[in-house]
Image (cartoon, rainbow, N blue to C red):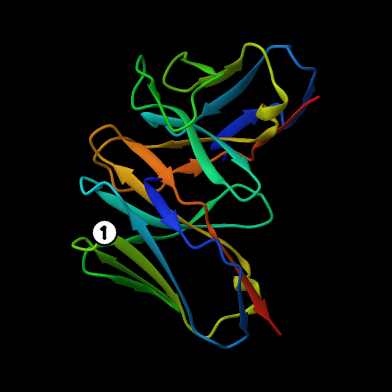
Amino acid sequence: NAGVTQTPKFQVLKTGQSMTLQCAQDMNHNSMYWYRQDPGMGLRLIYYSASEGTTDKGEVPNGYNVSRLNKREFSLRLESAAPSQTSVYFCASRPGVFMNTEAFFGQGTRLTVV
Amino acid sequence: RKEVEQDPGPFNVPEGATVAFNCTYSNSASQSFFWYRQDCRKEPKLLMSVYSSGNEDGRFTAQLNRASQYISLLIRDSKLSDSATYLCVVNWNRDDKIIFGKGTRLHILP
């Protein structure tokens, strides 16, 4: 059971570099999410997508872009990485609106920007 | 004001004791509520959903108070393995946004 798969698991970037974090789910879920987690800050929502073709800003969207490529995939792009974006990034998915079910998480991507 | 707020702790509790956490949310339109557990910066995992009438799962009891806009988690007969961070989660059905609290760290002491 793959569930939610994130790639890469670890990444080191130089300031100003760009990269895309990939997320794919095989559970036919409608909703997908990107969070970042910093020490003492819990998980903060960056962007989410309630269905294919739609995306919405979360709590901390600045410096990020997302693409809901299809129902399975939801990518997060850092156009010009900054040290403040050093964090652990989690992708999640859940069946969809009006379904009182849990969200399933990937194992996280640990990103360091130097 | 953050949409979901929790006391970050840490709560240091002797094994066998009962411990309770509260979480407040600011948006009265919130529809679904959950408690997640997270170990050592691993991915969060569902502990239990929170239903309007309250619900229990073994040693864990969750309550929802819509009038006062808070949810609670009670852990009875705590075990060393309960040491973790407990995350309060609120979901808005209208657009399926999910917001996490900062989490409450729990240390069970032998």
Vertical side of B55 occupied by B77: above or below = below
Task: Return the residue at label 1.
Answer: B69
Q: Residue B37 appears in which quarter of the rendering?
A: bottom right
Of residues A76 and A45, the one nearer the viewer is A45
Q: Image point 47% across, 13% down: which residue?
A: A69
User: Which residue is at 67% across, 35% downward?
Assistant: A87
Q: Residue furthest front?
A: B1
Q: Position of residue B104 (x, y in %)?
A: 54, 62
Residue positioned 35% across, 58% down in the render: B24
Numbered disc 1: what chain?
Answer: B
Amino acid under disc 1: Gln
Specify whether B31 is left or right of A39: left
Q: Quadrant of the C terminus of chain B?
A: bottom right
Q: Is residue B16 left or right of residue B59?
A: right
x and y percentages locating residue A18 in the rendered image: 69, 12
- The answer to which image quadrant residue B91 occupies is top left
Q: Where is residue B86 shown, x and y percent of the image?
A: 52, 61
